[in-house]
Image (cartoon, rainbow, N blue to C red):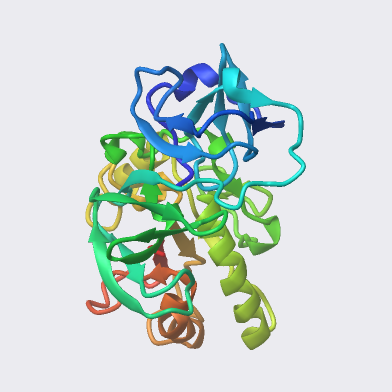
Amino acid sequence: MTTTHSGSAQLGTEAAGTSRFVAPGIDSLNVRMGPSSAYPAVGLLMPGAEVTGIEYAGWLQITEGSLVGGCVSTDYLTTDRPAAMPSVPCPHIVGRVTTDNQFANIRSGPGFSHPIVGRYTCHERVAGALVDDGPWIRTDRGYLNGGTIAIYATNPGSLNGCIPLHLLSPIPLCYNTDSHFDPGYTQATPRYLNGSALSALHRLQAAFKRQFGHFATIDLTYRSYAEQQYWHEKFGSPRAAHPGTSNHGYGLAIDFEERDEPWIFSWGAVANRWLLTHQAGFGFHNPYASTLQEGEDYHFNFVG
């Protein structure tokens, strides 16, 4: 899950560009919740594993891959690329389901093509092993997408709307609606998502374009706490979640383009029907489909 923890503000906000390798000669390297050995370990890296992130005061905050946001000591890193990469880069990972009011899908295998066999509930603890380099995690109940969990917060709710943008992934501008709307959005305004959610969105967009000849246009994705306040003041509950409780605040929700008049993403329209039919195959879920709540035809959460 591309989020952060309470200690990450110390580690800088610029885009990451430092790549290192876990040094040989150790059994494994702990990935910790924060930049200190006092933080609990939330994962392991094997010697030779590559990590990319931001260095600060003897620690590196990981900014790519399934352990994004975790911290490793630079004492055990090297610039020397190993002759052979480790076959198991992370044999163990621990986290909690990030969403406040949804769930994370459990699948029978490591991929969206495998059927859903259960769910982890919001903030439920998850422990397992990465499959290859991730993002899928094998647990004792099945497989879930690592993008749905936070590995470095005992209370994932504390992350909502407070994620540094360098721990999120910018979506292509070609996905954006060309509409202008408050607070200051244009087609050129960057939108951001959790990295795993964006990978799933790319697959969805490719299939959507094959079907309709164009991308599924997007209004909103990640929302800071301040932007959540703006929308809550504008629309109130339940249309806008109370600030600090929206799945947009984790980069795990997408609002496809909304219009005042009926159109392709409106309930029952052609694009809406396609999204509801195919959503599970791309790891998304519209929680309002069964109730047909006014105004929520466009909202889809990433649930793996």
Judge left or right: residue 127 versus residue 173. left
Residue 119 position in % (x across, y down): 26, 66
- Residue 228 percent location from the top left of the image: 37, 42
Query: Residue 65, relative to residue 41: is it above or below?
Result: below
Residue 186, given in percent of the width and then of the height, sits at 63, 51
Q: Residue at the spot x=37%, y=24% of the render? A: 6
Q: Is residue 31 visible?
A: yes
The structure residue drawn at horizontal position 56% and vertical position 43%, both measured from the top left corner, is 184
> As displayed, is residue 58 above or below residue 106?
above
Can you say whether 29 is above or below 273 in the image? above
Q: Please state if 12 lies on the left or on the right of 114 as rendered.
A: right
Using the image, determine if residue 115 lies above or below residue 74: below
Quadrant occupied by the C terminus: bottom left
* Residue 268 placement: quadrant: bottom left
Horizontal and vertical percent position of residue 177 = 61, 62
Q: Can you tell which quarter of the image residue 78 is in?
A: top right
Front one among 202 and 270: 202
Q: Nearer the viewer, residue 229 or 151?
A: 151
Residue 12 in view, yes or no: no
Q: Is residue 25 left or right of residue 242?
A: right
Query: In front: 301, or 236?
Result: 301
Q: Residue at x 41, y 81 (%)?
A: 276
- Seen from the viewer's position, the closer of residues 263 and 38 is 38
The total number of labels drawn is: 0
- What's the residue at 28%, 39% (across, down)? 157
